Amino acid sequence: MSTPRVEFRWVEKSFGGVHALRGVSLTALEGEVHALVGENGAGKSTLAKLLAGVHVADAGELRLDGRVVRFASPAQALAAGVAMVHQELALCPDLSIAENFALGRLPRVAGWVRRGACEARARAALTELGLDVDPSRRVGELSVAARTLVSIAAVLDRGARVLVFDEATAALDEREASDLCARVRALAAAGATVLWVSHRLSEVLAIADHVSVLRDGAFVRAFKRGEADEDALIRSMIGRPLARTRASGAVADAPLVLSVRDLVSPRGLAGVSFDVRAGELVGLAGLVGAGRTPLLEALFGLDPDARGEVTVEGRRVPQGDVRAALAARIGLVPEDRKRQGLVAALGVRANWSLGLERRFARLGWLARAREAEAAGESLARLGTQYASLEAPVATLSGGNQQKVIFCRTLERDLALLLLDEPTRGVDVGAKHELHELVRSVAASGRAVLFATSDLPELLELATRVLVLCEGRIVDDVARADATEERLACAMSGVSAGT
């Protein structure tokens, strides 16, 4: 029987009077993958960060191999064999892989850095993980999946035997996520203990030996492998089952909202043509680099090099002009909410009103009371949770940050809503709410075009799916004909059944 490696005993943590953890106790065993699931704000990431030394518990104790430990920093945790690998990877993009491996421990002889030794050590660690990558290559040139694996190799090289993953697959496509999960399972089989935080429940069920459910900062229950399915996890996470619905098909004679002809761009578009009608929810499928994000950004005027014909409600929209896109009643919820959708240092109110300031301006002054009232009403309609309208938006959970962006975008009178990975890093409850919101947008007669790397989400939400491969549309699939097999084959450039 495996022995306990990590033990949380009655752990508590608060931030500004808000309880993030309420007496949580759970145990992760040697050689297992232990997953943490729960809604945004349930305490998953906080618990993971306590183990990794990012936060310090207010009460309770943490045990590692039976000994009580208290990590005041990630460096202390790493020295004890605990390391964190998360979505926003702690690598320096302008340094080589070998230089990243050697940060803080450069091998020197007589004051000179031994670059050959750096590269040899990095190469050995990469090979141990099964990676065939040149250690002299700059990290910024690597894909997100490759950077994730490099991060794992780097912490293993520093002696880590407890690995903490926080949404490590959020930016990966299905194939990359599957590969990472297989490697993580192999690490556990070799004796490592893995704490795995993820919103992807199918992934959790595939990878985890044990799953612990948190709700509102408290431990709810744990499941062994095979004891739960997705519905059981959801009921434990939110206290109720979710009503699952699918979008209805679009009316064939509905008004044409978006028409795209021969759209090309050096950013990854090679002659894209398609139409979207009022009430349609059109999904974009494709592997990383297929052209989904470049297409959405070109439609919103963010690509000055895009060429082709785009019309919205019969009026041509010039390329490379965001103002023209806004005037054409196009709205975009971007892929990266932290870098493209929000200003972390500003409050919730200020982020909600970005681009809407003129609505609350009078004689050159901003009517803040009217702005705050409108923001509160808008955010309440989507059940957005926040301590104060003036609280930094960075203090909100990922799901609530996404709701701020949705609410701001939908304050405009839109004809076309563009969504890029709209539920990435969002818990199952918030995901359901956002799906219902998007359906209501389409039901009101507007057109929706969305990109997601989550195939089940495509099948649940889309009335039609356009499959992109190498910058071209290679399949146009009606909802009734869409299956994961057909989409996956088209994304890979092969025909289903071959």
Image (cartoon, grey):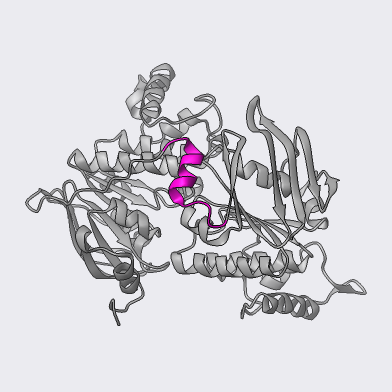
Left or right position of 328 against 358: left
Q: Is residue 226 magenta?
A: yes
Q: Is residue 361 magenta?
A: no
42 and 49: which one is in front? 42
Residue drawn at x 67%, y 69% as measured from the top left: 189
The image position of residue 55, as x and y in percent, is: 72, 41
The image shows a total of numbered marks equal to: 0
Residue drawn at x 62%, y 66% as measured from the top left: 184
203 and 2: which one is in front? 2
The image position of residue 282, as x and y in percent, is: 25, 55
Residue farthest toward the bottom in the current orientation of the protein = 498
Q: Is residue 57 above or below residue 306?
A: above
Residue drawn at x 28%, y 76% as measured from the top left: 496
**Which quadrant is the C terminus positioned in?**
bottom left
Residue drawn at x 53%, y 38% as measured from the top left: 397
Q: Is residue 485 above or below residue 40?
A: below
431 and 233: which one is in front? 233
263 and 480: which one is in front? 480
**Which quadrant is the N terminus positioned in?**
bottom right
Q: Which residues are magenta?
A: 225-240
Residue 442 seen in render: yes
Left or right position of 355 against 100: left
The image position of residue 476, as x and y in percent, is: 21, 66
Left or right position of 317 against 314: right
Q: Is residue 85 above or below residue 122?
A: above
Residue 261 seen in render: no
